[in-house]
Image (cartoon, rainbow, N blue to C red):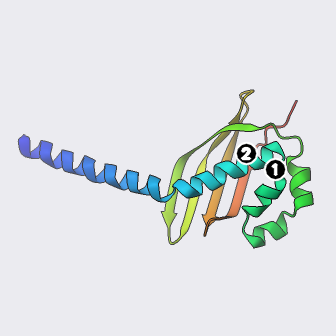
Amino acid sequence: MKRLFKILLIVALVIGVIVVGVMLMTAGDRTIARQFMTDVSTGSFDAALAALHPEVAKEMPLERMQSVFADVEPYTDVSFSNVQASGGRTTLSGTASTETGCTSAVDFMILGDQIAMFNIEPLCRKP
């Protein structure tokens, strides 16, 4: 019985170390994605554009970003329930919520401290 307890304790410890390691390794990427959500929803489009990978920025120039996000409610809480990191790439999936209770599903791919892909569905529009 003691041996089983020790094995379970070691397994739990290893899992804990792995989880903490992933969280520490992806902290910067999660911050980039959260800040992007804040920037696009509060009208800081220049800052949001600066966070994008150059190829993504070509597809989403400033004028298009302004028109897409012009009437979006500010997102006040962004959390990620799925975080995967491998090969210098981090993928994040989670939710973003506004003060009025509207929630959007969010997905990001961060590559080299730049947003290489993002998806926000549905956008929370101002009433």
Label 2 is placed on what type of residue?
A: Thr
Quarter occupied by residue 78: top right
Q: Residues within 10 Å of mark 1 (few under 14, many from 20)?
A: some
Q: Residue at left 72%, top 61%? A: 51
Q: Nearer the viewer, residue 77 or 81?
A: 77
Q: Can you say which quadrant of the picture contains the C terminus?
A: top right
Q: Residues within 10 Å of mark 2 (few under 14, many from 20)?
A: many
Whole-Å distance between the Cαs marked 2 and 1?
Answer: 8 Å
Locate residue 65 relative to residue 32 in the image: left or right: right
At 16% across and 49% down in the image, what residue appears? 7
Does residue 99 appear left or right of residue 80 in this picture? right
Residue appearing at x 26%, y 47% in the figure: 12
> Where does label 2 land, which residue?
38
Task: Name the amino acid, label 1.
Answer: Ser
Residue 63 x %, y %: 92, 59
Q: Is residue 19 left or right of residue 50?
A: left
| Name of the residue lying farthest toward the left | 2
Rendered image: mark on residue 44 = 1
Extreme residue toward the top, this view: 100
Question: For numbered disc 2, what is the local secondary structure?
Answer: helix
Please identify the quarter of the rendering in which residue 101 is found: top right
Sequence-wise first label, 2 or 1: 2
Is 75 drawn above or below residue 31 in the view shown? above
Q: Residue 89: x and y, percent? A: 56, 67
Q: In the rendered structure, are the residues bearing label 2 and label 1 in contact, judged by CB atoms less than 8 Å apart? A: yes
Q: Position of residue 46 (x, y in %)?
A: 82, 57
Per the image, label 1 sits on a secondary structure element best described as loop
Q: Quadrant of the N terminus?
A: top left
36 over 104 or under it: above or below: below
Would you place residue 42 above or below residue 64 in this image? above
Percent x, y of residue 55 = 77, 72
Residue at left offset 69%, top offset 62%: 117
